[in-house]
Image (cartoon, grey):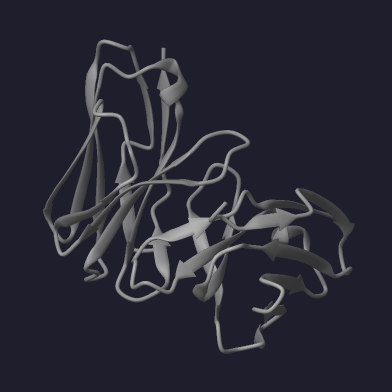
Amino acid sequence: SQQGEEDPQALSIQEGENATMNCSYKTSINNLQWYRQNSGRGLVHLILIRSNEREKHSGRLRVTLDTSKKSSSLLITASRAADTASYFCALGGDTGRRALTFGSGTRLQVQP
Amino acid sequence: ETGVTQTPRHLVMGMTNKKSLKCEQHLGHNAMYWYKQSAKKPLELMFVYNFKEQTENNSVPSRFSPECPNSSHLFLHLHTLQPEDSALYLCASSQGNEQFFGPGTRLTVL
């Protein structure tokens, strides 16, 4: 499959805990992006990591990429109830194709 | 607000109706996309437009007809849909790698 596959499908944690989501893929990529979606709404871009990068930070977000294992992880530190949402990884291809290929998502529930 | 608007936000239609979804982006982007999001399925790419030209059609049935009159507007014309076409239809635009999404149109086909 060309799409990313997220793991776990669902995650429930307490406020203040860290949340880790993983994405595995099978194709070559130019970049990998993470998006967030609140229930029934559009997706919001969180962070992009290029294929030649191994780690990237943005606020409470930390993304890692291991191209040898074709996997990425998204870590949200010190989670808040407002972080409750679905999180998707999206693969940017290396052929100049504009479209992204999205995974099936991880549904995160942060309990207050 | 992401700079991408979609109308209507909700639409209920019968299988014999004809309706259109509209997307407008105020970001000056040169690429626009239609995605379909069904329950418990990954986001499915439907169409890609680059500088008003369709560059991808992901084997979408002909009952979905896209139109891109200019780089800021994208339409999805719907006719003789099936109940399984009920979903959230998302529009997005981009200039570089990051895509900006609209809030979506929740479509119900009766």
Q: Quadrant of the C terminus of chain B?
A: top left
Q: Quadrant of the N terminus of chain B?
A: bottom left
Instruction: Give the residue displayed 63% in from the left and 36% down from the top.
Output: B40
Quadrant position of residue A76: bottom right
Instruction: Give the residue displayed 66% in from the left and 55% down from the top.
Output: A5
Q: For this view, does B50 lie left or right of residue A29?
A: left
In depth, the one of A22 and A17 nearer the eye is A22
Please say whether residue A112 is visible from this viewpoint.
Answer: no
In depth, the one of A29 and A49 nearer the eye is A29
Residue A45 rendering spot, x and y as whole percentages: 51, 67
Please say whether residue B104 is visible from this viewpoint.
Answer: yes
Instruction: Give the residue displayed 16% in from the left and 61% down from the top.
Output: B71
Residue A16 rendering spot, x and y as whole percentages: 88, 69
Instruction: Give the residue displayed 51% in from the left and 73% down from the top.
Output: A29
Residue A65 rendering spot, x and y as whole percentages: 67, 79
Compared with B61, A52 (above or below) is below
Residue B107 rendering spot, x and y as whole percentages: 41, 28
